[in-house]
Amino acid sequence: MKLIQGVKVRNLKRIPDERGFLMELFRSDWEEFERFGQAYITACYPGVVKAWHYHKVQTDHFICIHGMAKVVLYDGREDSPTRGEINEFFIGELNPILLKIPPLVMHGFKGVSPEMAMILNIPTELYRYDQPDEFRLPPHTDQIPYDWARKDG
């Protein structure tokens, strides 16, 4: 898959021992780090789609810490060499990755595990309640060439 310009993916490593495991999720010395704004968890029930939105300033850093989620990105940026590209990632307990989503890239996710999918986001900006840096489209819009239905076969 050709990555959308500015998107970065880092495989995360579990370090197991007889007590359980440790897994570093995000470090300030990794190339994906720009700055810290805040950390929060967003969750969805199985089969639920939370999409589409983008930020003008904020970069998101998604890590699915429980269950599995299908995260989809769409590059609608006028001046981007990857304009029109779709990236689809299955992230979570079976595929622990850090996904960096740059500003202006539309994104959303769908719970694809039998249990709730929980995504930890570490954005570069604080959420501003009076002026949110968040712009939305409905999940099933014809402005983005993507179908959230499961692809059997």
Image: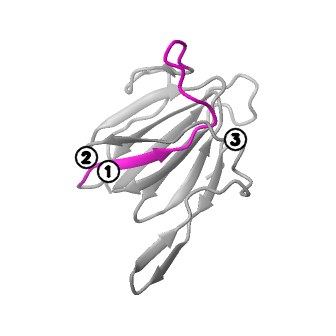
Q: Residue 54 location in percent, x, y? A: 55, 27
Q: Name the residue carrying label 2.
A: 46
**Which is nearer the eye, 81 or 102?**
102
Q: Amino acid at mark 1?
A: Val
Tags 2 and 1 in contact by the CB under 8 Å rule? yes
- Indicate which disc, 2 or 1, sits on the residue closer to the N terminus: 2
Q: Residue 143 location in percent, x, y? A: 49, 21
Residue 49 lies in the magenta-colored region: no
Name which residue lies at 45% across and 55% down: 91
- Indicate which disc, 1 or 3, sits on the residue closer to the N terminus: 3
**Figure colour scheme:** one colour
Name which residue lies at 74% across and 54% down: 31
Q: Nearer the viewer, mark 3 or mark 2?
A: 3
Q: Residues within 10 Å of mark 1 (few under 14, many from 20)?
A: many
Q: CA distance from mark 1 to mark 3?
A: 30 Å
Q: Amino acid at mark 3?
A: Arg
Q: Nearer the viewer, mark 1 or mark 3?
A: 3
- Indicate which disc, 3 or 2, sits on the residue closer to the N terminus: 3
Majority secondary structure in the magenta region: loop
Range of magenta residues: 115-132
Q: Name the residue carrying label 1.
A: 112
Q: Name the residue carrying label 3.
A: 35
Q: Residues within 10 Å of mark 2 (few under 14, many from 20)?
A: some
Q: Residues within 10 Å of mark 3 (few under 14, many from 20)?
A: few
